[in-house]
Image (cartoon, rainbow, N blue to C red):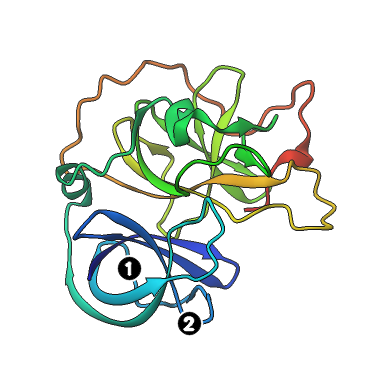
Amino acid sequence: MEVLIVSKTHMSTMACVGGLVLTNNRYVRLLEPGNYNQEGDTDFEVGDIWDINFHNRGDLHPPHIEDVIISNKNFLRRQTNLPAFLRARNTIDWTGHIDSIFDGLLHWTHSGSGYIPEGGNLPPKSVGFWQTNRDLTRVIFDSKTRYRFPNGTNYRGLSYVGYQETTETIPAGTILRISFSRIFPPEGSSITAPRGYYLQLSGWYLDEHPVNTNPVPIPNTPRIFPTRPGFDVDDDLPF
């Protein structure tokens, strides 16, 4: 099947690679036999189209229903202008405010991390494309990169786990690929964050000709996490 590579994210020293099957717009997460992620120096690059034979992983753990095991692969070609390509295929899952993504099921920590609690209502998938209606601003906290969605004092942010070079601002109207982490924190961890599946930003696709989305005007957003009552730095997640 022809598979467009749409994301590549850091998983320790490995790479988690996401694809879109072009025959049916199915989301897949490309694993090696034994349920292993790709090597960190994998040949897969965002924008590549590969001919890949795969089968479904045998022990799926919702919401991560996209896992497939590669049996063989062959590079075909490179796809340019990914935003136009994705829009033409009607692959945008959510448009607008961040609270609309994943069926509105997200909970939020004090520091603005979105998550689905363990044992909570799960969305039908763990990945998707979102077109934001506001600029996202890069913030750095303890050497970790996040992108903040402006939402007053009710903080909303996405931990960035992708490979592409960061930019200070992701403009309104940009298509982003978002996903959930595996269950976190691990059993027995001393981390105090609520246990669940955490929202991540895999990457984004900039328009060659930006789309007019009438973004909502907002004041300048601070680029550091402020100190405020109830703010617990331990809520910040290490991914």
**Where residue 206 sits: x, y (%)?**
27, 45
User: In the rendered view, would you say 122 is above or below 219?
Assistant: below
Whether residue 33 is visible, yes or no, is: yes
| Three-letter code for the amino acid on which mark 1 is drawn | Glu
Badge 2: residue crowd in 10 Å (few <14, some 14–19, many ≥20) = few
**Viewer-proximal residue, 116 or 45?**
116
User: In the rendered view, would you say 73 is above or below 11?
Assistant: below
Dots 2, 1 in contact, CB < 8 A: no
**Where residue 125 sits: x, y (%)?**
45, 48
**Residue 89: assigned label:** none
Label 2 – label 1 distance at C-alpha: 20 Å
User: In the rendered view, would you say 112 is above or below 162?
Assistant: above
Whether residue 177 is visible, yes or no, is: no
Location of mark 2 (residue): 33
Quadrant in which residue 140 is drawn: top right
**Where residue 96 sits: x, y (%)?**
36, 26
Q: Which residue is drawn at 47% across and 57% down?
A: 65
Location of mark 1 (residue): 45
Is residue 17 shown left or right of residue 158?
A: left
| Three-letter code for the amino acid on which mark 2 is drawn | Pro
Q: Report the mark closest to the observer, 2 or 1.
A: 2
**Viewer-proximal residue, 77 or 143?**
77
How many marks overall? 2
Callout 2 secondary element: loop
Quadrant in which residue 67 is drawn: bottom left
Residue lying at the far front of the rendered structure? 58
Q: Earlier in the sequence, mark 2 or mark 1?
A: 2
